[in-house]
Image (cartoon, helix red, strand yellow):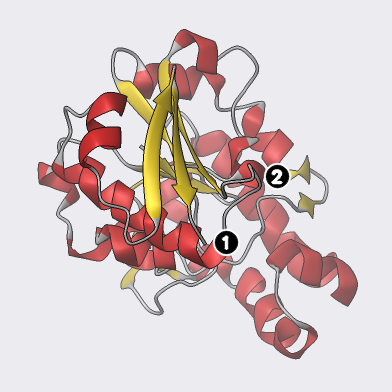
């Protein structure tokens, strides 16, 4: 299951710094190291305007954001399921899970790490997936160009539940999705426009929790049995599940 990250992140972590994650054997280690180096460098080279776009923070928080990037390589780590504290992740109950015993492989899209498993160490970073990070360019494009083989490796032979919004869905490399059993979940209003963002995040989290508890579910099961909350209905068309809000 593919989930977006969140701006909200828990503070603190273990004394183990994040740097070993970019150096230990991992298919994305080299790319992660590139992003880490560029992010730390950006702390001293980016203008305030560029830094605001890169980190997604308001002007009042730029000093803290700059300091956070500068110290990123030495930052303490928490496993991903405890680090991300957004509405989606809270409603999915990720922090209470034990990744070691799950039957669903949940991956979170990350501007810093590409795709991160629930048990992987994550520092308290701020990097917008849709932003540009010199000299790497747009992070979405950077990761799209490097995730193809990794996605095929981890998702071969299993159903992929894609719960990503537009910006984060850009991480899919061309042609890779067609080689997998991928199901897209869309959250819409009755007129076909995107559903209210706040309501969508709650519903997406509830759906993620349901899928984690029902690892063998297929789209028809979701449409018939999943409860996304008041005002939501579910329908299936091919490889797409559409959740429609009456609000």
Res. 139 mark: 2
| Residue 84: % across, % down | 41, 64
Q: Residues within 10 Å of mark 2 (few under 14, many from 20)?
A: many
Q: Nearer the viewer, mark 1 or mark 2?
A: 1
Which residue lies at the image location 69% right of the left edge and 58% below the top edge? 39
| Residue 92: % across, % down | 29, 57
The image quarter containing residue 237 is top left
Pick whichever of labels 1 and 2 is earlier in the sequence.
2
Q: Residues within 10 Å of mark 1 (few under 14, many from 20)?
A: few
Q: Which element carries disc 2, helix, strand or loop?
A: helix
Res. 196 mark: 1
Which residue lies at the image location 75% right of the left edge and 70% below the top edge? 43
Q: Is residue 66 above or below residue 165?
A: below
Q: Is residue 89 above or below residue 99?
A: below
Q: Which element carries disc 1, helix, strand or loop?
A: loop
Q: Please say whether residue 114 is visible from this viewpoint.
A: yes
């Amino acid at each position: 299951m593919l989930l977006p990250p969140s701006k909200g992140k828990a503070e603190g972590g273990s004394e183990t710094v994040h740097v070993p994650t970019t150096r230990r054997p991992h298919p994305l280690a080299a790319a992660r190291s590139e992003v880490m180096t560029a992010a730390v460098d950006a702390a001293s080279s980016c203008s305030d305007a560029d830094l605001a776009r890169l980190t997604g923070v308001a002007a009042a928080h730029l000093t803290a954001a700059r300091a956070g990037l500068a110290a990123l390589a030495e930052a303490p780590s928490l496993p991903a399921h405890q680090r991300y504290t957004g509405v989606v992740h809270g409603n999915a109950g990720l922090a209470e899970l034990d990744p070691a015993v799950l039957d669903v492989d949940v991956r979170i899209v990350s501007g810093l790490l590409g795709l991160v498993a629930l048990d992987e160490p994550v520092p308290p970073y701020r990097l917008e997936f849709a932003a540009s990070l010199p000299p790497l360019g747009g992070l979405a494009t950077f990761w799209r160009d490097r995730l193809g083989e990794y996605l095929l490796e981890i998702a071969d032979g299993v159903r992929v539940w894609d719960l990503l919004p537009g910006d984060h869905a850009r991480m899919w490399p061309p042609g890779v999705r067609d080689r997998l059993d991928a199901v897209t979940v869309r959250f819409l209003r009755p007129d076909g426009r995107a559903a209210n963002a706040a309501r969508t995040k709650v519903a997406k989290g509830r759906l993620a929790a349901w899928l984690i508890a029902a690892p063998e579910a297929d789209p028809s099961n979701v449409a018939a049995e999943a409860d996304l909350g008041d005002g939501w209905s579910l329908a299936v068309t091919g490889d797409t599940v559409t959740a429609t809000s009456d609000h």
